[in-house]
Amino acid sequence: MALSLDDIRGLYERHGGLAYSGEPVTQLEHALQSGALAEEAGADDALVAAALLHDLGHLLNLQGETPSAHGIDDKHQYFALPFLRPVLPDCVLEPIRLHVDAKRYLCAVDPSYRARLSADSVRSLALQGGVFDDAQASAFIAKPFAEDAVSLRRWDDAAKDAGKRTPDLAHFLGIVARVMQAYAGEGGPP
């Protein structure tokens, strides 16, 4: 089953008020901040859409507000993909799929990165397989869309600012709609 734009809006309206894994923002605030950071960085529509939707899996697979505190890796980076694949291209889906591995990669290649992670991100890192070794890091960054996933990861990490003003959900859903329309115009999924 594909998620429509209305389905995505409904998920944020129903579950967007949940706390974002022990951070001082809600799921919706985190999504909006991620999208805003991508826009501020000059990302294209596809990557802005990925930034908005990267944690949609949390809203589809509700495991409580901080699953990692209970030893749960909800695999949110994969959960939304089957629902989005019929309506969005790989340039949106792959950064979403890879954003957790991007954290593992950044911990391996940037010694200061891990020190800046929030407590929940450190906890979830262990559940998600830990820091990549050199071979894993090299293999990761060679993948298509890995660089976009690293950018997305950095916006993800920064999108935890209580009270930060952003454009509203309708603004970002307009961007998602443009990407969906362009994808449908190109013939949709392969």
Image (spheres, rainbow, N blue to C red):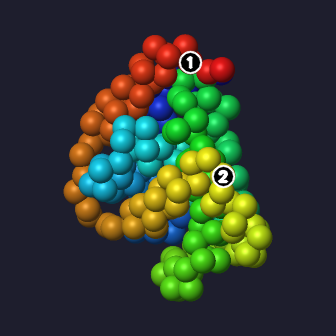
Disc 2 on helix, strand or loop? Answer: loop
Q: With respect to residue 115, does 66 lie above or below? A: above
Asked if residue 61 can be seen in this view, the reply is: no
Front-most of residues 66 and 175: 175
Q: Quarter-wise, where is residue 9 in the image?
A: top left
- Report the number of discs: 2
Q: Quarter holding the C terminus?
A: top right
Q: With respect to residue 153, does 180 lie above or below? A: above
Q: Is residue 128 left or right of residue 49?
A: right
Front-most of residues 188 and 30: 188
Q: Name the residue: 33% across, 67% down.
A: 161
Q: Identify the residue position indicated by label 1 in the image.
A: 188
Q: Name the residue: 42% across, 19% down.
A: 181
C-alpha separation, residue under disc 2 versus residue under disc 1: 22 Å
Circle 2 residues within 10 Å: few <14, some 14–19, many ≥20: few
Which kind of residue does numbered mark 2 sit on?
Lys
Q: Identify the residue position indicated by label 2 in the image.
A: 143
Which label lies toward us, 2 or 1?
Answer: 2
x and y percentages locating residue 144 in the rendered image: 62, 47
Asked if residue 165 can be seen in this view, the reply is: yes
x and y percentages locating residue 134 in the rendered image: 73, 75
x and y percentages locating residue 60 in the rendered image: 61, 40
Which kind of residue does numbered mark 1 sit on?
Gly
Q: With respect to residue 112, does 151 lie above or below? A: above
Q: Name the residue: 64% across, 77% down.
A: 108
x and y percentages locating residue 185 in the rendered image: 46, 14
Q: Name the residue: 70% across, 54% down.
A: 74
Disc 1 on helix, strand or loop? Answer: loop
Which badge, 2 or 1, comes first in the chain's sequence?
Answer: 2
